[in-house]
Image: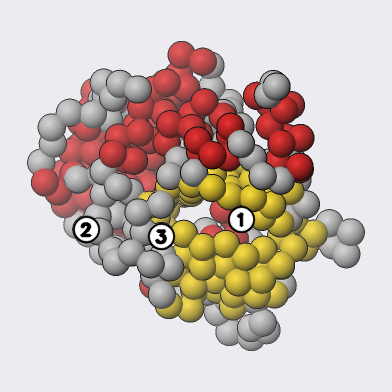
Amino acid sequence: MNTPYLVAAPPQASLTPDSVEDGDFIQLRQVRKAYSEQLVVMDQMTLSMRADDRLVIIGPSGSGKSSLLRVLMGLESIQGGSIHFQGKPYIDGSRKHGKPLDEALHKQIGMVFQHYTLFPHLSVLGNLILAPVRVHGLSKAEATEKARAYLSRLGLESKLHAYPSQLSGGQKQRVAIARALMLEPRLMLFDEVTSALDPEMVTEVQNVMMQLADQKMAMIIVTHDMHFARHIATRVVFCANGKVVEQGPPQQLFTAPREARTREFLEKVLHLD
């Protein structure tokens, strides 16, 4: 894929932070997430990823894909198990009192959602500098300089003072990605970020994500786009009924799945022979 939106930028606008050590960058151990006795979306889920991994999570609706991202982002609690991030305890499902997650580690994770979640009453600049100023204590001038550099890389510098209602869907998602990157996350989560876009706009957003991949950003991506998954993933994870059924390199999983449930799913979405 081409990456027409990303051009040379000042060092402070690097799209990825300094690399971290490989190993168990993220580790889920027997994680349980249930909304009720009947609705269990993560059923003793165990999964790990390395710092140089780009995990693409695929599976049928209700298999726990988006719930996994929301749990990692601290938006949903878990009822059992634990999650380690960068070798440190991050979320403990057995903790009944106190903070459910490590706030310092939480700040090192960024997430981009399907429906942009930009603040409509703030300009593009206002959306980008809000968290760095309030959370990281950057001055408005520092945050503005940083925002300009990111927007320049994403081909959006001319939209600095525009409002979300004045942007196309693809532009909104690129702004949402820039906003997440402003906090210099170690891990980026993408939840079906192109599913609400027109086909032409999908390419805009996927180009940005491919550039992040080229720069070795650790990512977990939930998508229904199997073609994109093949291109960006270092490892594909197939989930069903809240469990990891199978995982492997995209070439192996898409062409020679080992599990019958994986093959059944792929036959429907890829029309395998």
Identify the residue at image location x=58%, y=84%. Answer: 98
Q: Do the residues labelled 3 and 1 touch (CB within 8 Å)?
A: no
Total count of labels: 3
At x 52% / y 59%, what residue is drawn?
73
Residue at the image point whose x is 33% and y is 48% from the top:
217
> Where does the C terminus fall, quadrant-wise?
top right
Q: Is mark 2 on a helix, strand or loop?
A: loop
Q: Where is residue 143 in the image (x, y as percent from the top left)?
A: 22, 50
For residue 18, the mark is 2
Residue at image mark 1: 68
Q: Which of the two residues, 21 or 135, is positioned nearer the viewer here?
A: 21
Is 146 situated left or right of 180 in this image? left
- Whether residue 123 is visible here, answered yes or no, is no
Q: Tag 3: Cα neighbours inside 10 Å, few (<14), some, or many (≥20)?
A: some
Q: Does 251 sit above or below residue 197?
A: below
- Say which residue label 3 marks: 50
Q: Which amino acid does label 3 sit on?
A: Arg
Instruction: Kindly report which numbered mark, 3 or 2, lies closer to the viewer in this rendering.
Output: 3
